[in-house]
Amino acid sequence: MSKKTSYSYVGIAFIILVFGILVIPNIIDRFNSDDITRDGSRSKTVSTTKISKKAINSDLVFIEINGVPKKVPTFSFTNQNGETITNKDYLGKVYVVEFFFTTCPTICAPMNRNLVEIQNQFKDFKDFGVASFSIMPKVDTPEVLKAYAENYGVTNPNWNLMTGDPEGTFQLANVGFNIFVSDTQDDFGFEHSGDFALIDKQGFIRSRKDDFGNPKIFYRGFIPEADGEDEDGYVQEITILKEDIAKLLNE
């Protein structure tokens, strides 16, 4: 091998050494700081995860079934204006869910007065609504629901009082929203809870945690905020419901 060839190899080796010392560390730094755009499925997954975490900025948790966040099931009912309302009409809105009937002589009246109070507090938010499902559809026709809404002062255009198939309604309550409703009747009508469910803009059931770190799932809706608690010692939860609605509206 000639001296000239040897000098060429030495020169090339020297250039590679300098490149490794000066250039490669900068490339590594750029990768670590995400300055370089990575192609492929991995980069898309990372990007989606970051956006998702940034979008959810409240401390409200999801109701999970086998580790999967529970979403509102598909439904279709007729509202007080004779319009067909489905779960898709509520996408993009934060809303409260209740199950009631207009002739209820006990908890339904305070439940709906509480909802009207909540409605009035969030009257400036076009992305807030209420979904009220009647559990006595044979009585609660659209005309009856409309009169009921007017009597209670329902003004929010996103508050639908709905009537439909009884079996589908009970299924939606007990399984869809985890709110107890029974088709057993007593002297006061159907047995049902006075709880509200809270739904976020993407259609997921949300709530705060209880003292044991578990999701509350629903909110006690029949005790007025001003009362503090009822005669049985149950504490009102309208205050925390208002706080959590505000959190979801800001997500």
Image (spheres, rainbow, N blue to C red):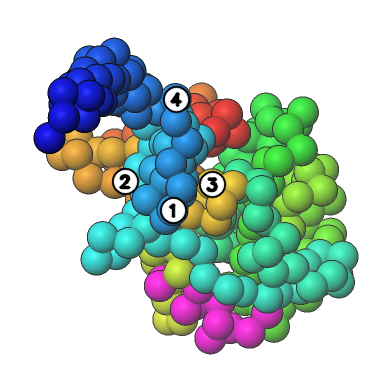
Q: Which residue range is magenta in the image?
A: 162-175
Q: Marks 1 and 4: CB-CB under 8 Å?
A: no
Amino acid residing under circle 4? Asp
Q: Earlier in the sequence, mark 1 or mark 4?
A: 4
Q: Choose between 44 and 115: the one closer to the eye.
A: 44
Location of residue 96 in the rendering, given as x and y in whole percent from the top left corner: 57, 48
Q: Earlier in the sequence, mark 3 or mark 4?
A: 4
Labelled disc at residue 216: 2
Disc 2 to disc 3, C-alpha distance: 15 Å
Residue at 42% x, 37% y: name it: 50
Amino acid residing under circle 2? Lys
Disc 4 to disc 2, C-alpha distance: 42 Å
Location of residue 6 in the rendering, given as x and y in whole percent from the top left corner: 16, 26
Residue 189 visible to the viewer: no
Would you place residue 117 above or below residue 147 in this image? above
Q: Which residue is mark 1?
A: 40
Question: Within 10 angstroms of label 1, few (less than 14), some, or many (20 or more) residues?
Answer: few
Question: Within 10 angstroms of label 2, few (less than 14), some, or many (20 or more) residues?
Answer: some
- The image quarter in which residue 120 lies: top right
Disc 1 to disc 2, C-alpha distance: 40 Å
Q: Which residue reaches farthest front?
A: 2
From the viewer's perspective, tell me whether residue 120 is left or right of residue 35: right
Residue 5 visible to the viewer: yes
Q: Which residue is mark 4?
A: 35
- The image quarter in which residue 231 lies: top left
Which quarter of the figure is the C terminus placed in? Answer: top right
Would you place residue 134 above or below residue 97 in this image? below
Q: Which residue is mark 3?
A: 200
